[in-house]
Image (spheres, coloured by chain):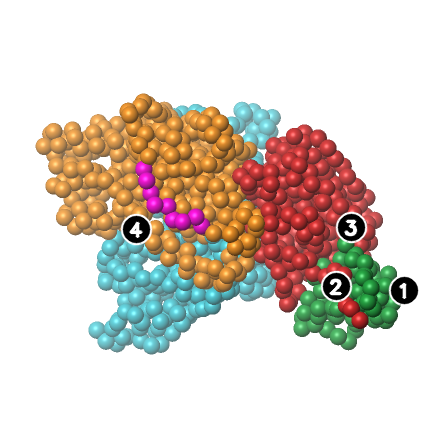
Amino acid sequence: MEQKIMARGFEAIGWGALAADCQLFAGCPTGPDDEAFAWLAREFPENGRHFVRASSEVSAINIAYGGASAGGRAMVVVASAGWGLIQETMSHLVNAFLPVVVVLIQRGGPGAGSLRHAQMDYLAVTRDAGQGCYRVISLAPASVQETYEATQLAFHLADKWCNPVIIATDAIVAGMTEPLALKTIKFDPLPEKDWAVKGRGHQPDGIRRFLSSAQGFIPTRDFPTYLSFLKGLNEKVLKMREEEIRYESYELEDAKIVLVAYGYSARVCQEALLMARAEGIKAGLVKLVTLWPFPVDVLKKKARQGAKFLTVEDGLGGLREDVMLAVEGQAEVETVDALDRNEPGAGGAIYPGKVLEKMKKWEVPKVGSA
Amino acid sequence: MVKKVVCGKPRLWRYRSTSLPFCPGCQHGVGARAVLETVEELGIEGKTIFLGGGGCAYPLPSLLDLDAMQCPNGRATSIGSAMKRLHGGETVIITYQDDNDALAVGTEPLIHAALRGDAITVILANNAGYGSTGWQMASPGDTPVPPEMDKPNPLFPINIMELLAEFEGVSYLARGTVSSANDFEETKGYIKTAIAKQMAGAGFNLVEILTACPARWHLTPQESLKWIREEMVAGLPLGEFKNGGGN
Amino acid sequence: MARKGEIVIDEGACLGCGYCEMFCPKKCIEISQEKFNPLGYPLAVFRNPEECNACGSCVVMCPQFAIEAYLLADKGKGKERS
Amino acid sequence: MIEIMEGNHALGWGALEAGCNAYCSYPVTPQNEIVEWFAREFPPRGKFFLQSTSEIESSFLCMGFVAGGARTMTSTASPGWGLYPEGMSHIVAAELPLVVALLMRGGPGQGTTRQSQMDYTSATSPGGQGGYKNIVIAPYSCQECYDFVQLAFYLAEKYRNPVILLTEPNVTRVLEQMERRPLKFDYPPEGKWALGGKARHSDGKARLITSGYGLTSTEEHPSYLSYLKHLHDKFERMREEVRYEQYEVEDADVVLVAYGYTARVSREVVKQARAEGIKAGLIRPVTLWPFPAEPISKKAEEGAKFLVVEDNLGEIGGLSDDVRLAVAGRAEISLVTALDRHDPGEGGSIYPGKVLEKLKKIKGIR
């Protein structure tokens, strides 16, 4: 029977992790992720799972690294302040083909920034923030239910691709209390983690396993040379980019202005969409579910139809660059960003009225006219 | 009738009409007073740099009349090590960090500043927990566990005095509390000695102050002080642990 | 002649934690049940002022720097505490 | 006076010329020679050299040196670079000038010990939190290491923001002729933000440095939004510092785009192509951020084709993305990537022959 509860976004992360049979959580409380931390601290030990309070984000991500190497499902929760500390290990996880789920609860930046929400880490999440060239799938939930489902999907995709997966949420979506339908998602089965390190005696074939984050430099079973490793990594990233694009579109068919947004600003855009349509403006929305891979084709199609684009993101620019790359110069791209917040304090946010105001800058034929 | 001020706000405190950004009974204010009064009495406010750590004590540097810096969580000691080299012996570097800042996130900078014998004074306000992030229990420094936690303390506290005493670069280590006026005076004495050691260039020194955090401990302010004197001190004894050594 | 003292409590800063009440050797301070500050915290109130000798224990222990202690002297010089 | 020197040391002599008086870093192949130079040359000159215990600590030790008013430099290589984003983000937030030399080696993870150009993206669209920007300069010779480190110190102090020198070990480890000729820059007047104790400041007033402008309001930045607006305007102003070079681009119908060691390879290719009658040219970004989009856009408008030469996984991203942004769909872009290296081992690199082969394929020549 499907159980419905009222839950916060913070808790939905934990419920999702339980549903995905995550065995190990490591974390170091930094505002605003501490409430997720409190729920996990209470619930994980109760459900026979490991909750490790790390001394800092550096040790947290490395504890998760160990959990993944042993074949377990491991997760960390970080806030923007502390995100910079895990990038070395993220890069090592990519090289070693190890699955870890990283939940980033964005807050104002840069540096210590603020304790409130923000969406300023787009480029850091969607590009290789650590050393070397790589990409990591990043999911952007916009509600408590989506957070719950994104966490389960993240564990599946991490194991499927043997690569870390990031869930990029913000303190508004994570802080909200909404109804949550607890239902475990059934994914298609994945191969056994035969590569996991368990102690030679525990390996069914008695052969030792060897994991390294210097694949290519140290010859490993799959990659005897560096070039073979680079080819393998390149193929994997291109396949991920092709197969794992997820987005939702709203009233795109006849849209002359296309809003592009994710997380809490996507909900702001849904409201702005209603207001625009009520005033006869032909607007549509592309709501990113995966930040990377980016849904290039849907935007390219609309660009060819002559649509204009308005990115809505509570940051200092980032999403705009990917939209510009997708439309390849065939469309105008304007932005609503953190400078359009409604009030100067750290709690300021982007409101639908501001999005509508910027949409009206373009004279767009009204509904009903040609 | 002559009315003469005996004592009141520390002179180096920038006047604030509203209360400090701390919970009722939190003793970061008293720890700050101990430092500021010492700096006043030694007459070194012109050459002192105050480095605040992360957590609840983050606002302190912006509220006092000293050259100050709000350092990222755990990094005040590294930043202090660099500044001490730069400005040399006649500048006094004081860091004010809570136990999460110095003993969890900032373990590496703290231990290696001590190993290098950097002549800075670390004031470690140990209130056995994370305040500003929702009152988690800290890994270090809180033995035994405050009463409301029925589970045994899964984490072993770091007794920083024992850990650092062995390092040659360390010249002075002391631990006090501010759980009474006499304790306050005693702790101020430790801080005065530590700063004097720093000014003599005698290497790394640290003064740990056990401070109350009633909100997280789920105790009244009075019970918190009692708990410090009886339970916390049992695990973290008071006194001077090292006096001498260093370069 | 005994030291005569007096204290002034900054009601904008006091959060009613009660350390002053706990440490005053002469029981001159009490956390009142009627007076509250804008945030709703009970305020410390100066009781039986004749007992106070401006020892400064309350001042030192107040985490909000909310108390100032004064020494009342007829003419002669008063002993500065610190 | 012509000297023979390796780029690693040229970085040091240039830093000395620029008045750098504090250096702190953690040794990691292939930048160990830079650390050794500073360890040998700085202490006898009364300047600060400090080997830290990790790259995290070096970034924050440098933050301390800078906050204390020192002209500071650090250097690292790719494996250490992954530990820098937190420190860099706090240094940017506190608006402190710092010069960071980053020698790229094969990645990701532990990677290899030899060169690559795979940290392009993590340097230009930085990996730290908060969506900030750093000026990134790419020297490709010993002389340029010497010159550009002096430029980097000037730009860092001009904008009070870190500047990254991005290069490869096969540029800085090579012995080359160079000349130590100091460059003059008009540095802004000494800022009134460094800490030293109140008595050191002429006005005797206390100063505050913070990297948490959303947590603390100051006179300079009373609200978080005013601070973000200030940062955004500063990053826009920094775009004026774009620098690039062009080789035989005027009449070129195939334009190579490359920096660092692959730019030297590409200059050789342009020479060989011209000898065979192929009109090829090279646009070489000197600053990778701000990216020189204008010359590329101009050639795209003229209908030229592009060949991006980068020892990186171009299909995934890097220099190729910035070129695609500049070209904006108006021209065909081909790639020479790390997969075209001459040798499968870690020492493999991009050779002129391979680039010429692809150039000819674009021109439809057998």
Q: Residue at x 74, y 63 (%)?
A: B5
Of the residues under marks 2 and 3, which one precedes in the sequence? Answer: 2
Residue D43, x across and y down, in percent:
50, 29
Question: Neighbour class for label 2 at 10 Å: few (<14), some, many (≥20)?
Answer: some
Label 4 lies in what chain? D
Element at label 2: strand
Chain shown in orange:
D
Q: Residue at x 74, y 35 (%)?
A: B243
Q: Amino acid at mark 3?
A: Glu
Q: Which mark is residue C1?
A: 1
- Of badges 4 and 2, the one in the foreground is 2
Labels 1 and 4 touching (C-beta < 8 A): no
Q: Amino acid at mark 4?
A: Glu
Residues in magenta, as a range: D183-191
Element at label 1: loop
From this view, report whether residue D313 is shown above or below residue A17. Answer: above
Magenta segment includes A107: no
Q: Which mark is residue B5?
A: 2
